[in-house]
């Protein structure tokens, strides 16, 4: 059994192409790119997944194959795949229901050039902005080895399909593990607690970290009560409720969690690059915001890094101060662990686990049929 997905890809090429497999891999930038984008395959559900850019490749190459250009030629005269059809197809694929247009429009090409700067100016994905038509650069599909020409379009599809199958297997086992723990949690509380703590890790997939953070924070505040009203004589009593407001790690420009009735905003991030915080603060016009950060550094160290970064970028003390004041609170991994300890004392760890299961199924589009 292969120890890495890179080994799977190379074994796949060897099984199909024999003696020329190594030469083919060395000449194929797309195969090398697939190796980079599938590194999470053997690291379980906690590892970051890479579906957006892979699916951008997948749907255009699939269109190429559906039109039989790998056999009949003439792709240079093709009118191109419709953007709407490509987006529809992406969202039909496993884990693709919430994908946006970024990878198709630029992100796949941009990342490809970071890996292979010598190819700058030769984009894998070609598009016509006016007609919203897309093509895959056939130079990356046709590999010439001596006198032999090999078209790897179908191989790209096969390899991505296998990667998706592996990731589906990880997710299925993760959900099954959660549900099994849910069944036995009453008699093995420590086992459930250890499992949830293991999900609060700097190496966790960004979406999973956001799900676990939300689940913990939801039940951390659920028993808190505030009183509000238009006059002291008529006050409303209301429990604090935390709501997710969009897909996790979606780059959709939205706010991750909102607390009712306070109107408190929470944003989940894994970066200490202040430019990201600047954008989040700007989009809500400097409204105070709590940042949930996938970091095990102390809160004081995080604030110091953010302040130093802000001063380096924006220079003017008054401007820097205005932005830093918008960081209402920093919740790091240590604080989330502390909140979890309190929930354990309150015997609410079962509710947290149930929320993790529910949100994971929703986020990853997981159903019984899968």
Image (cartoon, rainbow, N blue to C red):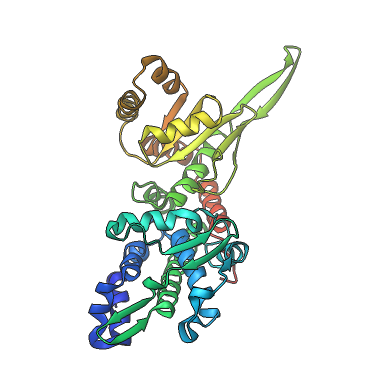
Given residues 190 and 94, the one toward you in this image is 94
Q: Is any part of residue 174 visible from this angle?
A: no
> Which quarter of the picture shows residue 19?
bottom left
Looking at the image, residue 260 sits to the left or right of residue 299; the answer is: right
Q: In the image, what residue occupies the spot 47% across and 47% down?
A: 212
Q: Is residue 43 above or below residue 244?
A: below
For residue 211, side relative to residue 19 (left or right): right
> Can you name the residue that lies furthest to the front here?
77
Q: Nearer the viewer, residue 273 or 352?
A: 273
Q: Is residue 246 above or below residue 259?
A: below
Q: Position of residue 306 (x, y in %)?
A: 34, 28
The x and y percentages for residue 315 are 34, 21
Quadrant that contains the C terminus = bottom right
Q: From the top left corner, tell me how far across and down residue 80 is, in percent.
A: 55, 69
Q: Is residue 307 visible?
A: yes
**Where, by quadrant of the figure, is residue 291 drawn?**
top left
- Image: 272 above or below 349: above
């Amino acid at each position: 059994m292969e120890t890495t997905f890179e080994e799977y890809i190379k074994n796949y090429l060897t099984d199909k192409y024999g003696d020329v497999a190594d030469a083919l891999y060395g000449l194929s930038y797309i195969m090398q790119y697939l190796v980079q984008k599938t590194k999470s395959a053997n690291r379980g559900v906690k590892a970051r997944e890479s579906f957006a850019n892979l699916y951008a490749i997948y749907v255009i190459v699939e269109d190429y194959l559906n039109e039989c250009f790998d056999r009949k030629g003439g792709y240079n005269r093709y009118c191109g795949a419709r953007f709407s059809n490509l987006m529809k197809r992406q969202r039909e694929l496993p884990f693709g229901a919430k994908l946006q247009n970024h990878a198709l429009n630029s992100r796949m090409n941009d990342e490809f050039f970071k890996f292979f700067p010598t190819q700058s100016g030769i984009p894998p994905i070609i598009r016509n902005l006016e007609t919203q038509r897309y093509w895959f650069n056939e130079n990356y599909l046709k590999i010439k080895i001596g006198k032999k020409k090999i078209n790897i379009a179908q191989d790209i599809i096969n390899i991505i399909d296998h990667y998706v199958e592996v990731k589906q297997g990880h997710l299925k086992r993760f959900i099954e593990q959660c549900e099994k723990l849910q069944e036995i949690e009453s008699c093995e509380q420590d086992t459930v607690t250890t499992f949830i703590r293991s999900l609060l890790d700097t190496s966790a997939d960004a979406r999973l970290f956001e799900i676990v953070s939300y689940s913990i924070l939801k039940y951390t505040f659920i028993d808190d009560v505030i009183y509000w009203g238009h006059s002291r004589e008529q006050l409303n009593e209301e429990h604090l409720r935390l709501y997710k407001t969009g897909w996790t790690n979606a780059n959709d420009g939205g706010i991750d969690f909102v607390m009712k009735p306070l109107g408190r905003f929470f944003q989940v991030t894994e970066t200490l690059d202040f430019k990201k915080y600047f954008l989040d603060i700007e989009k809500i016009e400097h409204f105070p915001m709590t940042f949930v950060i996938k970091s095990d550094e102390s809160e004081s160290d995080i604030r110091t890094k953010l302040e130093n970064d802000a001063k380096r970028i924006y220079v003017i003390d008054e401007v820097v101060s205005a932005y830093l004041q918008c960081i209402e609170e920093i919740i790091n991994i240590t604080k989330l662990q502390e909140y979890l300890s309190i929930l354990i004392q309150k015997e609410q760890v079962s509710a947290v686990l149930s929320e993790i299961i529910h949100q994971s199924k929703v986020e990853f589009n997981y159903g019984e049929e899968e």
